[in-house]
Amino acid sequence: MSELQLYAYIAVFGSFAMYFVIAWWARAGSTSEFYVAGGGIPPIQNGMAIGADWMSAASFISMAGLIAFLGYGGSVFLMGWTGGYVLLAMLLAPYMRKHGKFTVPEFISDRYYSKTARIVAVVCLIIASLTYIIGQMKGVGVAFSRFLEVDYGLGLGIGMAVVWVYAVLGGMKGITYTQIAQYCVLIFAYTVPAIFISLQLTGNPIPQLGLGSTLADGSGVYLLDKLDQVVTELGFKAYTTDSLGSNLNMFAYTMSLMIGTAGLPHIIMRFFTVPTVQAARSSAGYALVFIALLYTVAPAVGAMARLNLTNTITPATNEHLEYAERPQWFKDWEKTGLLKFEDKNSDGKIQYSAHAETNEMVKIDRDIMVLANPAIANLPNWVIALVAAGGLAAALSTAAGLLLAISSSVSHDLMKGVIAPDLSEKKELLASRIVMTMSILLAGYLGLNPPGFAAGTVALAFGLAASSIFPALMMGIFSKRMSGRAAVWGMVSGIGVTMLYVFQHKGVMFIPGTSFLGNMEANWFFGISPNAFGAVGALVNFTVAFIVLKLTGPAPSNIQQLVENFRTPGETSVAHRYQ
């Protein structure tokens, strides 16, 4: 066993042991503890748990990789995901916490006085959550397959088992305290290598400042200027220029991520775990600080990773690395299939460029950038192992939150709320655990066999949430007159048009190898890409809802009074739910 593998086993399984101990200590004994941790989580701890729930494998592993290759265009993820959190904290979470419900579909059911609305919300939630969880499962498989040198499927199975233990046993209570530990692991694992690499490249130990600093080689050249020079010499667009098409597409992409984020049920549920409305607002502020610790470092990580990668493969202009002399990290990632070289001219050298006919680096998966960056920079093995533990913590924490959102929507919203209203608390708790077990198995299957329309991206999940759940919540809070029938038609129209557009332009349907309306990528609606179409779906949702409202009439007066009650400043009158 190599030194790196030993460190990886210690870091990964040591953190897993900590999660198990916490889960056993904080196991849920009632539905209140299972769904909302008994409503007694202090704001600072809840802020850390929100940070872990928020910073998924997409944030930890994929975001810096996207920024590394998209450059300026990757800023949509920073703006969209953080902006969405601000929207959620200011416009949705306090009002929904005051109303005092366990889940998002339950709130929608009460607000829109309709079981149909509840069922539609559950369906939208499950579609968005399952799509999102695919990315987490991929993150788990990638981290395990590389650092523990096990098969991707086996690594995924180990991750599923870990989530099952602490999510099914502890529910929201166990997940919350586990996520606090996971936040500490992931933020330490993300920032420590960034500090090392920033110091190495620029002499500045603060990555956020290192990104705008001159290189440590004494040349006086700024890091971003050097990166622009290096990538343009290889035929790529300058790193600091836009790479996401038109300004309209960039705006739509940012908006889709922003309002999709604000509509993600597993994040909204976190605000139900605090005792008061004021605590919900406070935990939102703390969470923003904890999230910023990673999100402000990500641009530096992305830029420095791209510079290190390019300088390693192509050490100098017109000089190519001998394939036989490739570094160890290159060989290690080749084994995973996420890095591939093809010697097109049989000269034994690695030619890396933007031109497909001559480029011999035929695959550089963006998801490897954060995980490979410490090894590329020749950092100590314990730092590399720490990154593996951090990536797994990020993926598992979000997967647990998503699985809880799915299980609660089925057991609490469908079974208890619609099918069997007289279901006892004990049977509901058992049903929740059974549903979560089934959800974990389904998530594992999707991780092994991702559907074509969702492979490689979680942006679609945000688009689906943006087009369905967010508008329903916004109209439910800020439009007293909005009726149940109008909201249902809005949700169905929004998510329907978004899914139709995605399937049409991705060239896929539910069956691999089939196309719905053909591959029409050249005919995007006003140049808006499928991953950015959630913003358009949200507009459709709002428009259809207000048209139906105009045709069918407003909500009853008692519902309008309900909306007034939870919009009125002051604490909720339903605190008994959490006692």
Image (spheres, rainbow, N blue to C red):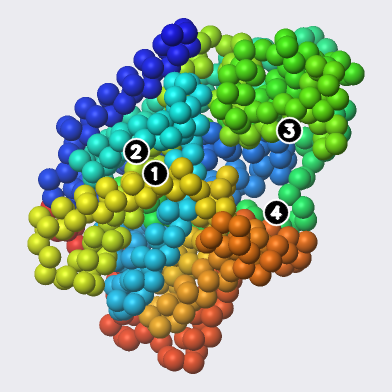
At horizontal 60% and vertical 30% (from top left) the residue drawn is 337
Q: Earlier in the sequence, mark 4 or mark 2?
A: 2
Q: Point out the image quarter for the N terminus.
A: top left
Of the two numbered discs 2 and 3 on the same chain, state the one appearing first in sequence. 2
Q: CA distance from mark 3 to mark 1?
A: 28 Å
Disc 1 marks a residue whose amino acid type is: Gly
Q: Position of residue 359 (x, y in %)?
A: 81, 31
For the residues labelled 3 and 4, the Cα–Cα distance comes to: 27 Å
Residue 250: assigned label: 4
Using the rendered image of the protein, determine whether residue 246 is visible from the camera's viewpoint: yes
Q: Label 1 vs label 2: CA separation? A: 7 Å
Residue closest to the eye, 273 or 197: 197
Marks 2 and 3: CB-CB under 8 Å?
Answer: no
* Residue depth check, mark 2 versus mark 3: number of the one nearer the observer: 3
Taking the image as shown, residue 400 lies to the left or right of residue 56, namely left
Disc 3 + disc 1, Cβ < 8 Å: no
- The amino acid sitting under disc 2 is Met
Residue identified by numbered label 3: 362
Up the image or down, 491 lies above or below 443; here it is below
Q: Position of residue 140 (x, y in %)?
A: 44, 34
What residue did someone put label 2 on? 160
